[in-house]
Image: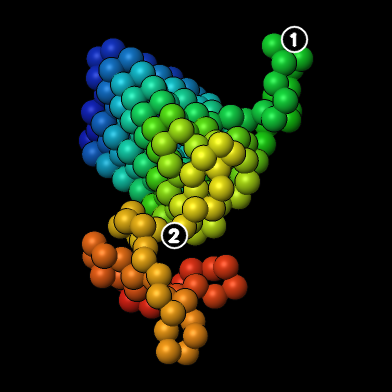
Amino acid sequence: MESKDFFVHESAYIDDNVKIGNGTKIWHFSHILPNTEIGDNCVIGQNCMIGPDVKIGSRCKIQNNVSVYKGVILEDEVFCGPSCVFTNVLTPRAFIERKAEFLPTLVKKGATIGANATVVCGHTIGRYALIGAGAVVTSNVPDYALYLGVPAKHSGWVCKCGVVLTRKTSSEGKLELTCSYCGSKYILEDKELSTIEEKI
């Protein structure tokens, strides 16, 4: 492990060949497995397991009781709520070895996964998307999309700051979405959200 300015609680266990970025904090009873890379200024909560062979970007927050398994990649500024779940095999059996069948999961920059949500492997969660608490993700999630329920369904759009956007139709007949919290503005065309004015 490289010598850097980070904090690891005395009850946590860090395996060999782990990279931990400056300013990162790893709390009680967490275990970081080999060949895992954690970026700068992350917070890893209590009783988390990360790895092996996992890459986590900078400024991520992984709350208590989260396991980030091989095949999962978290880009920068991802929030994983308490006890959210990642899988890496679609059809697991205790008596059949399926490590060669791991499917990747990519969580893009700024996305949020709510408490107790489950992300089934083989999917991508888009930038600044928000997965509601208890949702079960079984498909790809677009950038800025709000997904709720079991299975999770597209239920709206969220701002970069996380607030659900309100809709109106412009004079040109295009659907505009505005954030009541920060004032950012977006436009929806062909089921994709594009930024008009981002204020954060």
Residue at screen point 31% across, 45% down: 59
Decide which of 98, 86 is in the foreground and name it. Answer: 86
Quadrant of residue 9 in the image? top left
Total labels drawn: 2
Quadrant of residue 93 in the image? top right
**Residue 195: where, in percent of width, then height?**
41, 73
Residue at screen point 28% across, 17% down: 28
The residues tagged by marks 1 and 2 sit, at their Cα atoms, a distance apart of 42 Å
Q: Say what amino acid the circle numbered 2 marks.
A: Trp
Whether residue 4 is visible: no
For the residues bearing labels 1 and 2, Cβ distance under 8 angstroms: no
Q: State which mark lies toward you, 1 or 2.
A: 2
**Which residue, as the protein is rendered here, is positioned at the far right?**
96
Residue topped by disc 1: 95
**Residue 96: where, in percent of width, then height?**
76, 14
Quadrant of residue 192 in the image? bottom right
Decide which of 27, 10 is in the foreground and name it. Answer: 27
Residue at screen point 44% across, 60% down: 157
Tell whether 133 sits left or right of 190.
left
Tell whether 91 sits left or right of 124.
right
**Residue 163: where, in percent of width, then height?**
32, 56
Whether residue 134 is visible: yes
* Sequence-wise first label, 1 or 2: 1
Residue topped by disc 2: 157
